[in-house]
């Protein structure tokens, strides 16, 4: 493996790149505008520029890992492929009937999400498998051929095969897939038993149809990306980050694009977990604020939380992901006036083009970035270490034109309102990931990153009541840096409904054996050494009669009566922690068996901060008025971060500028710069109802 490793994170506004020479410990960082029409174009341009800066030949690159938002954008914007579905007779409307849950209880006109496979593209065939896997009605193979021919004639490019109870017996789906490929060799195709071998038909059908709709989209993109990387002279196959925090081959992503919805944010969480533990902060709340959205996660004892289901565009997607909460709050979030005359911020964004008005690319609508410009919180002449000129007067004009008149406020008060609203929105996201999970956020440090995270972190921390803020050395590039730390990981699951008692051992052991075979096949496909694989077994459990589950860890792939008893006690404890009570006299059942398989990769050496040179005064760029919530405009020293001496301290107010981010430090804060170059900010917290959980 070559000594040069590259991590690439494509965001809504910028594409971030990190290059590490793992032999020398040297690092280079770069930002380039994202190209929304074809993200690979911006990536490849950024790679060329970064390799030139580092004076490294493409042939020396031994590792490339890419985090992408392509699947997320395609679903949210409805830019999926024309998708058909072949399903069991009588069940084609399962995906539309859903769970009859209303996202807004008091809204009588809630818009329903549009399924990737519209009703006219959902074909029914005769077949029936029972919940125990027994065949009730054989598969009508001729009906499958006819259904495939009709979907092909209607212009579909992707097909999802979703049969009832296929999690218990996949034979009918497997045969149907063979028939469809006979009729239609070049179709993009997936089966529900291959995507999600779990019960609950609606969730399985929804996840599978979403996956099918993304197959052509992700294949086209990866083909361009891989070809471009190869044309640069990089010989190593690039890896793609998944939502679960593991990097896999492009082939694996082509088969399961649904696993990449949180590909980009996952890199940041992995990077934050490593940096936090290294700096003595294993318990952190992450705040990843970019141009279009903010992702929040909770890391306990250095380990990010995980979950097994997320909603995407109104559909439940049941895949293993890091436990992230995302809101439409970023530097490019638009400020607007609702019909009632109230100021709102987000979720719509100016995106990479035209971007904020102050970027001078034609944008005329006010954004969070424009508000920060007006308030003096951002550099008034250029960003990205001077590489990107900005035009504060255009941001001011956008706020005056669009906000000041309707609100009856001057530009400063309107801009302050924009910042205050976006801060409260992000505070709500932190509460969702912490308080709503029974955790007190005040026991955690806040770690902001992304291009805009450090700009708002101290304000958000004060609202919540978090006294410690930990700003990494490279906050705006952390997601790209985290990609260099990604292990390879695959997650597998299988429904096995059985009571948690000794009489169920045979059924459960059979399920474990099936998952083990799946994992071995996956390791071979990924060309990974089986002897290096680490297996993590778990079971989803519930009290009989409940319709939700909690996970309990299995010590190994061998079960016995003592193991079952231990699982039951572990479940009781988890239930009590999550809901405040246990029902020790109620029978417990196992619903799903889960297996996570990981192969640990070597990690690059730490990004060592340059040795201290000069003094705090020599790091001073200028003094300018900066607005703070409690003190209004205050003359504030502006420091160049790369010139700040290590292992020193200073007091706020201050603004710390660097190529990839800007950190705003309020007047009553104290800052310690550690030996790694991280900023450890402490703010005083008074008794604050908002911080109470």
Image: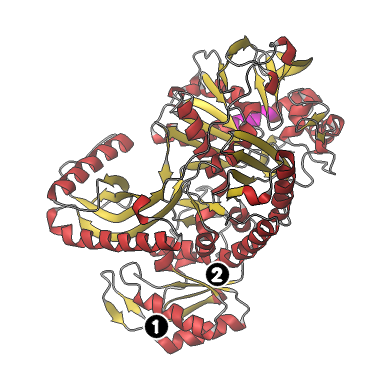
Q: Nearer the viewer, residue 34 or 684?
A: 34
Q: Nearer the viewer, residue 108 or 445?
A: 445
Q: Which mark is residue 117?
A: 2
Q: Is residue 62 above or below residue 120?
A: above
In the rendered image, residue 424 lying in the magenta stretch gets the answer: yes
Residue 624 appears in the picture as rendered: yes
In the rendered image, residue 390 lying in the magenta stretch gets the answer: no
- The prevailing secondary structure element of the residues shown in magenta is helix
Residue at figure coordinates x 66%, y 27% from the top left = 455
Horizontal side of residue 681 vs 330, given as left or right: left
Q: Nearer the viewer, residue 616 or 56?
A: 56
Give the image location of residue 210, x and y in percent.
53, 63
Give the image location of residue 271, x and y in percent.
52, 37
Q: Is residue 148 above or below residue 420?
A: below
Quarter of the image with the C terminus in it: top left
The span shown in magenta is 419-425
> Quadrant of the rendered structure where residue 647 is?
top right
Q: Which residue is mark 1?
A: 126
Give the image location of residue 86, x and y in percent.
47, 76
Instruction: Pick whichever of labels 2 and 1 is earlier in the sequence.
Output: 2
């Amino acid at each position: 493996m070559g000594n040069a490793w590259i991590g690439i994170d494509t965001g809504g506004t910028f594409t971030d790149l990190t290059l590490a020479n793992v032999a020398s410990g040297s690092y280079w960082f770069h930002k380039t505008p994202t190209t929304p029409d074809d993200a690979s174009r911006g990536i490849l341009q950024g790679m060329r520029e970064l390799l030139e800066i580092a004076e490294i030949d493409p042939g020396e690159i031994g590792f490339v890992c890419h985090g992408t938002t392509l699947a997320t954008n395609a679903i949210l914007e409805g830019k999926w492929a024309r998708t058909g579905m072949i399903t069991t007779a009588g069940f084609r409307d399962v995906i539309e009937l859903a769970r009859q849950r209303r996202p807004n209880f008091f809204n009588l006109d809630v818009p329903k999400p549009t399924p990737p496979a519209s009703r006219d593209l959902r074909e029914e065939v005769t077949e029936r498998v029972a919940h125990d896997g027994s065949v009730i009605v054989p598969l009508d193979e001729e009906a499958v051929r006819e259904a495939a021919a009709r979907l092909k004639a209607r212009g579909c490019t992707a097909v999802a095969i979703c049969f009832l109870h296929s999690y218990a017996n996949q034979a009918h789906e497997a045969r149907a897939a063979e028939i469809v490929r006979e009729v239609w060799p070049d179709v993009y195709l997936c089966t529900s038993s291959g995507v999600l071998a779990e019960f609950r038909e609606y969730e399985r059908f929804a996840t599978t149809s979403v996956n099918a709709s993304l197959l052509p989209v992700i294949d086209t993109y990866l083909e361009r990306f891989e070809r471009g990387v190869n044309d640069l002279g990089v010989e190593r196959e690039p890896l793609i980050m998944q939502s679960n925090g593991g990097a896999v081959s492009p082939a694996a992503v082509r088969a399961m694009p649904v696993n990449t919805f949180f590909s980009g944010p996952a890199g940041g969480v992995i990077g934050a977990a490593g940096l936090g533990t290294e700096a003595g902060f294993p318990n952190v709340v992450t705040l990843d604020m970019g141009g279009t959205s903010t992702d929040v996660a909770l890391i306990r004892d250095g380990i990010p939380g995980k979950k097994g289901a997320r909603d995407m565009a109104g559909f439940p997607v049941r895949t293993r992901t890091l436990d992230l909460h995302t809101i439409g709050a970023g530097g490019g979030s638009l400020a607007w006036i609702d019909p009632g005359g109230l100021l709102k911020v987000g979720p719509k964004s100016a995106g990479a083009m035209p971007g904020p008005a102050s970027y001078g690319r034609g944008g005329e609508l006010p954004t969070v970035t424009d508000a920060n410009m007006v308030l003096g919180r951002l550099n008034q002449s250029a960003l990205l270490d001077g590489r990107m000129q900005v035009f504060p007067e255009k941001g001011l004009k956008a706020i005056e034109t669009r906000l000041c008149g309707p609100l009856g406020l001057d530009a400063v008060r309107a801009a302050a309102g924009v910042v205050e609203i976006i801060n409260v929105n992000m505070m709500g996201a932190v509460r969702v990931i912490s308080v709503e999970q029974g955790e007190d956020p005040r026991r955690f440090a806040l770690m902001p990153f992304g291009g805009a995270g450090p700009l708002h972190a101290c304000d958000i921390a004060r609202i919540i009541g978090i006294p410690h803020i930990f700003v990494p050395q490279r906050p705006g590039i952390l997601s790209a840096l985290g990609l260099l730390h990604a292990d390879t990981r695959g997650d597998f699951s299988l429904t096995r409904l059985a009571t948690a008692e000794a009489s169920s051992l045979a059924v459960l052991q059979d399920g474990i054996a099936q998952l083990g075979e799946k994992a071995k096949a996956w390791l071979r496909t990924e060309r990974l050494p089986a002897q290096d694989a680490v297996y993590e077994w778990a079971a989803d459990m519930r009290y009989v009669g409940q319709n939700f589950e909690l996970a309990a860890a299995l010590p190994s792939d061998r079960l016995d009566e003592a193991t079952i008893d231990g699982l039951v006690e572990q479940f009781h404890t988890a239930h009590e922690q999550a809901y405040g009570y246990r029902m020790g006299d109620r029978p417990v059942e196992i619903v799903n068996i889960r297996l996570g398989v990981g192969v640990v990769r070597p990690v690059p050496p730490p990004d060592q901060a340059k040795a201290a040179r000069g003094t705090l005064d020599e790091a001073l760029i200028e003094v300018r008025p900066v607005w703070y919530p409690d003190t209004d405009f205050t003359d504030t020293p502006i420091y160049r971060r790369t010139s700040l001496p290590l292992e020193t301290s200073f007091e706020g107010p201050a603004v710390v500028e660097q190529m990839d981010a800007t950190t705003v430090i309020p007047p009553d804060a104290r800052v310690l710069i550690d030996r790694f170059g991280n900023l450890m900010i402490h703010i005083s917290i008074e008794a604050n109802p908002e911080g109470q959980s």
